[in-house]
Amino acid sequence: MTFTHGYAANGDLRMYYEVHGDATTDKTPLLLIPGGGSTIQTNFASLIPLLAAERQVIAVDEEGHGRTAATDRPLTAENSAGDVLAVLDKLRLDSVDVLGFSAGGHTALALAMQHPARVRRLIAASTFFSRDAVPAEFWEGMKSATLDNMPAVYQDADRRLNPEPGHLERLFELDRQRIVGFPGWSEQELAAITAPTLVLCADQDVMDPEHAVRMSRTIPDSRLLIVPGGHGDYLGELAASDGDLQPMLATLPFLQRFLDS
């Protein structure tokens, strides 16, 4: 299986990307966008080899995460969607399938709304489009959150890649401010998405499954999948799965079927 990696520039931001596997004529490349605090490796290391056995997989680290350095601008879904677009342009990809997880799902939604021609199919995993998807306690908790609240696996992963003083603290603050300042989108904005969409969440996720139902009924031509589990264990996300890949292996066929249909 071939592997390449590089950086794509969007103004001062240089987004790190990886390309796993070879392009095929019968399957559209799949772009993976990790969740907040996470990286390609902590979010998708177990999933990528299985997906790349059948299709080319592209994965990115968002601003301040992994191998993508932070800039002076805020980390928002719209800014990050522009970074992703720079990656697609550099790789000369007119259209891709996109899977965005959690805060990375916000980036995926923004990309699908802002650049509909570039997204063939969309998987919005464990993400939400409006602030009422989670209780008020969630927002209050994020306002006062500290680095101690960040999962240890995320902290360890960032320190291994970026041992310089202050990097981890900067990463945490980028993510905290991103969520605290998230304005959400209206149902009218969400209904403008043209890509066939799979709304995916777990039954014990951050948001209630009822929000996933609402999303699936708002986005035209969308499907809904609710799986048993928690926030990302069904994707093999390291903090959620703790190495147990059975939920991911059970979910994978549904993802492949949606992408192949």
Image (spheres, rainbow, N blue to C red):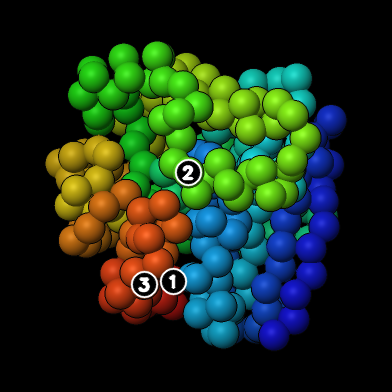
Badge 1, how many Cα within 10 Å: few under 14, some, many 20+? Answer: many
Residue 144 appears at what percent x and percent y? Answer: 40, 14
Residue 72 vertical position relative to residue 229 in the rendered view, above or below: above
Q: Amino acid at mark 1?
A: Leu
Query: How many marks are shown on the rendered structure?
Result: 3
| Residue 152 seen from this side | yes
Residue 179 vertical position relative to residue 127 in the rendered view, above or below: above
**What quarter of the picture does the N terminus occupy?**
bottom right
Q: Closer to the N terminus: mark 1 or mark 2?
A: 2
Looking at the rendered image, the disc whose residue lies closer to the viewer, 2 or 3, is 2
**What quarter of the picture does the C terminus occupy?**
bottom left
Q: Amino acid at mark 2?
A: Ala
Residue 23 appears at what percent x and percent y? Answer: 69, 79
Q: Closer to the N terminus: mark 2 or mark 3?
A: 2
Quadrant in which residue 244 is drawn: bottom left
For the residue pair 189 and 74, the one nearer the viewer reads as 74
Circle 2 residue: 152
Do the residues bearing badges 3 and 1 touch, measured as CB atoms within 8 Å?
no
Circle 1 residue: 259
Q: Secondary structure at mark 1?
A: helix
Q: Amino acid at mark 3?
A: Leu
Circle 3 residue: 245
Residue at 63% in and 59% down: 59
Residue at 70% in and 26% down: 166
Quadrant in which residue 74 is drawn: top right
